[in-house]
Amino acid sequence: MRIAAIIVAGGSGSRASRSLNDIPKQYVSVGGQPMLARTLRIYETHPQISRTLTVIRDCDADLYQACSGAAHSRRMAPVHGGETRQQSVLNGLRALKDEAPDFVLIHDAARPFITHAIIDRVILALRESVGAIAATPVVDTLKRGAAGMIEQTVDRVGLWGAQTPQGFRFADILEAHEAAAMAGRTQFSDDASIAEWRGLRVALVDGSRENWKITTAEDLARADRVFMNGWETRLGTGFDVHSFEPGDFVTLCGVRVKHTHKLNGHSDSDAPLHALTDALLGAIGAGDIGDHFPPSDMQWKGADSAIFLRHARDLIAARGGRIVNVDLTILAERPKIAPHRGAMRACVAGILEIDIDRVGLKATTMETLGFIGRREGLAAMASASVALPMKSDGMT
Ligand code: MG
């Protein structure tokens, strides 16, 4: 079953633009990360999503590039949106034609509090239904008003607030969108209403009131507060040792360094990256590197240790978290680390997609003492600080 996600980021966000900049809201930082980057990462770390496609305004290409981070294997090139949200989604659906996924989830970039649990529920409902959307029961009493006066109280029984993701069988929602465009029906405000108009049955599944949409400048400020108040800081540590054997280079922090020996081990034996992977896994209580990449598994023989580090990074992102900083110490009599320090820090920052000033790297000799002093091997220690959103209830 192949599932694609379309992230709709084609709006101008004029209702939320901050006075100091004119950046559309989906590119504005909330809690230190652009809204779109956060939303995208949650989909790209979901195990069942095979493709992500973002719809952007053509004038926002630079903003998109700056905020979307390093290329991701599941990510398709962005497509340009249209005049309306409906047109933007249609452009996204057309761009997925060649991929022909079984299902597509359509999600607004302005809902950065989406969780894997909600995505799971929508996907599950698609087993039984052509369409399924996240939604929450309306809790406020509803009034219809005119000129600032109540005209009528609307019975809220059976009323739901529609959220995203909205998931559909791909062929059906593409057909419905094309038919709506052909019929000149261009005023639908969500994709479910197009499906309904086409006679498709769409299921309601539990969203979360925390999966709210950031619309106004007030919402942006609230989102910032949520990120600031609702976070806890975690700490993890890691340690690793590898012995030397005959060879002519070692790989440390992803950088190849000439040496009189190489490091013995199953992967590329990048001890600092192994220690760092363990530190990140430790910060989220997710076991250690051997649990995720068993040394008995032949596919990791000679592997680039960046793979392990990326995996830990993605596990943190999947929990909606972010890496605050990491700090490494390499213990080695030889080779000398100092000449490579800049390249090593840059490499780690690149893999983790964090600023280089969040990566510390030091080295020390062991004053010729012990196995390291005798140049039989080297060791590395790492610590990592990770910010995680605190869970407020079981549903999210
Ligand atoms: Mg190791």
Image: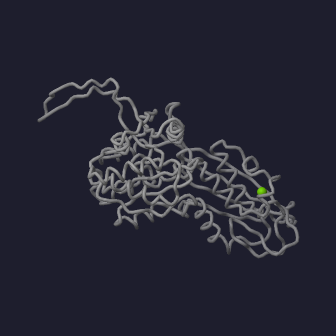
Residue located 35% across and 35% down the image: 161
Percent across and percent down for residue 99 are: 52, 58
Residue for point 35% across, 54% down = 25
Residue pictured at 27% horizontal, 25% vertical: 141
Image side of residue 273 versus residue 297, left or right: left
Above or below 39: residue 91: below
Res 349 → quadrant: bottom right
Q: In which quadrant of the rendered view does residue 254 lie?
A: bottom right
Q: In this view, does 328 lie above or below 154?
A: below
- Colouring chosen for the image of the structure: one colour
| Residue 237: percent from left, percent from top | 68, 49
Residue 256 appears at what percent x and percent y?
A: 72, 72
Q: Is residue 212 left or right of residue 240?
A: left
Q: Is residue 119 above or below residue 324?
A: above
Q: Residue furthest left?
A: 147
Q: Which of 10 and 374 is in front in this view?
A: 10
Depicted 215 relative to depicted 125: above or below? below
Quadrant in which ligand 1 is drawn: bottom right
Of the pair 385 and 74, the residue shown nearer to us? 74
